[in-house]
Amino acid sequence: MLDQVAAAFDRRDYQTASHLLKELLKRSPDNPWVQLYVARLQEVSGKFDTAEETYRQLLRNATNPKLATQARRGIQRVETLQQEQRRRAIAQATSHPSNNEPGFMVLESVTGDARNVAIQNLARVMKLDTYTARLLLPNRGWRLYRSGTMGELTVYGQDLKEAGVPVFWTSLAQLQKIQVFQVQFFQTVSPQAMVVCRNEQDQLGSLTFDWAEVSQRVEGIIPVFEQVLTLGYRDRLERKEATQDYTHFCDLHLPGRRSILRLHDTRYEFHQGIQVISKQAAIAKLDQTTIRTNWNNLLALLNQQLSGKPVWSEFTAFAETTADFATPLRKLKSHIRLPRATDSHWDSAFQLYSGMIFLQNFE
């Protein structure tokens, strides 16, 4: 009967092959040659993922060299077909001008029993080895995974979502539409909040809002780099970039206004507006110690007003995954002003992190 199945495949009579295989599976379900033809039927039926898994299972257990060769060829055929299918999908997706816009994709964390399944599915969809997939899939926070055109990201993203891998992507254009206001200080906090702030054109004004409008807040720490002189090889002076300090940021999201209110510890005018500084700090010079104290007091005030609202604070883990994306990140305006000789991808990384959180929870 196996010869009859082979003959049916040769003449592409897959209906007959399917009928014969059903009988063979009843008689000899563990016969590896039967399983090989099952995989071929899955392949010609377009069930590429299932076919690939069947071929790989056969290859792992194969003791017959001829069977191993057939399974290996099957895997190669399926991979070629999958690549061609994805290439056509990307070509179709990018045929529309809007899908040629640049964008970013993040992988979300997976923990517990679901993690191993997600790792296997990430490896299968993206054609990675399991070890690499395990390193890529975060167990906390987010990882910046890809940048590219929205058409490409949509094809990959939909495949990953269907495989149960949590992923999120958005366009640069959508991120740029979010207004960012730089808060100078809070003038009032009750019954409504009013902030004195600067808009993107650096114009000074005020904005009044209800605390209920704030959907969430995002906190992050960005390193401040400076060029320093160090002793290098044979005590020669060398210039190196070193972290001299860290600066704190806090974004308040106002989705109804499609706006972000950004607070920055070294730019917030603690001596203006509402009282958030201690009596000692009120008469002391604003050095790093008093800035940290005052900043913590300001966060305590926000905790009081925004009790129960989500706080996203895993920016550092996310930023550490963005170093390889420094070039595409330059296209994203950071709305961060730090005293640096050169720009850092950390600034745009914070804007991306906050912006993607904003858009993911926008609906």
Image: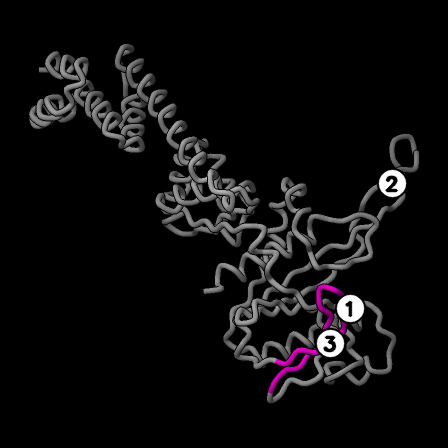
Instruction: Look at discs 1 and 2 and give the one toward the viewer.
Output: 1
Please report contact status of discs 3 and 1: CB closer than 8 Å, yes or no. Answer: no
First reached walking from the N terminus: tag 3 or tag 1: 3
Badge 1: residue crowd in 10 Å (few <14, some 14–19, many ≥20) = some
Q: Position of residue 209 (x, y in %)?
A: 60, 80
- As drawn, which residue projects farthest toward the bottom? 191
- Between marks 2 and 3, how big is the CA–CA gap? 42 Å
**303 or 326, which lies in front?**
326
Q: Position of residue 305 (x, y in %)?
A: 58, 81
**328 or 220, which lies in front?**
328
Residue of label 2 = 239
Q: Is residue 306 above or below residue 326?
A: below
- Between marks 1 and 2, how big is the CA–CA gap? 28 Å
In magenta stretch: residue 199 = yes
> At x 7% / y 25%, what residue is drawn?
23
> At x 39% / y 27%, what residue is drawn?
84
Q: Magenta part of the protein: which range?
A: 192-208
Residue of label 1 = 267
Residue of label 3 = 205
In magenta stretch: residue 31 = no
First reached walking from the N terminus: tag 2 or tag 3: 3
Return the mark for residue 325: none
Task: Specify the amino acid type for callout 3.
Answer: Gly
Q: Is residue 193 above or below residue 7?
A: below
Badge 2: residue crowd in 10 Å (few <14, some 14–19, many ≥20) = few
